[in-house]
């Protein structure tokens, strides 16, 4: 069962990573590229906007974690 669980999590993470990326992109200005905002050459304003978008998703991540453990 351990191997099946690890495989399931690896597949789950692919989909959830794309889901979170789409939610972060929706919080950024229209036409923004997450890679450009995450690059070392990003301006402080770009980094601040990306951090704010990620901060807003903390609740969503927590709810997903709680759901995965079926705590509510």
Image (cartoon, rainbow, N blue to C red):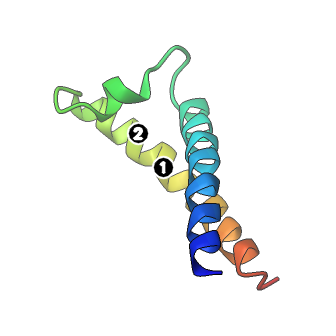
* 68 lies left or right of 39: right
How many marks the image carries: the answer is 2
Q: Secondary structure at mark 1?
A: helix
Q: Residue furthest right?
A: 72
Using the image as rendered, state which of residue 32 and residue 9 is in the foreground.
Answer: 9
| Residue occupying the far top of the picture | 31
Question: Of 24 and 9, which appears nearest the observer?
Answer: 9
- Can you say whether 37 is above or below 2 in the image? above
Please tell me which residue is depicted at 55% across the width and 58% down the height of the picture.
10
Choose top left, top right, bottom left or bottom right for residue 7: bottom right
Q: Which mark is residue 54?
A: 1
> Does residue 9 lie above or below 19 as drawn?
below
Disc 1 crowd, CA 10 A, few/some/many (<14, 14-19, 20+): some
Q: Residue 13 versus residue 70: which sits nearer the camera?
A: 13
The answer to whether marks 1 and 2 mark residues whose Cβ atoms lie closer than 8 Å is: yes
Compared to 49, does 54 lie above or below? Answer: below
User: Would you name the residue on which mark 2 appears?
Assistant: 50
Q: Residue furthest left?
A: 41
Q: Residue at x 70, y 69 (%)?
A: 63
Label of residue 42 in the image: none
Instruction: Give the secondary structure at mark 2.
Output: helix
Q: Quadrant of the C terminus?
A: bottom right
Image coordinates of residue 69 in percent, x first then y, are 71, 81
Percent coordinates x, y for residue 65 in the rendering: 64, 72
Q: Residue at x 41, y 37 (%)?
A: 49
Q: Is residue 7 left or right of residue 46?
A: right
Image quarter where the N terminus lies is bottom right
Residue 9, position in %: x, y?
60, 64
């Amino acid at each position: 069962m351990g191997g099946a669980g690890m495989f399931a999590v690896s597949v789950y993470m692919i989909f959830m990573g794309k889901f979170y990326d789409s939610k972060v992109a929706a919080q950024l200005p229209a036409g923004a590229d997450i890679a450009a905002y995450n690059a070392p050459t990003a301006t402080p304003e770009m980094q601040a906007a990306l951090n704010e978008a990620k901060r807003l998703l903390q609740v969503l991540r927590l709810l997903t974690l709680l759901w995965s453990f079926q705590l509510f």
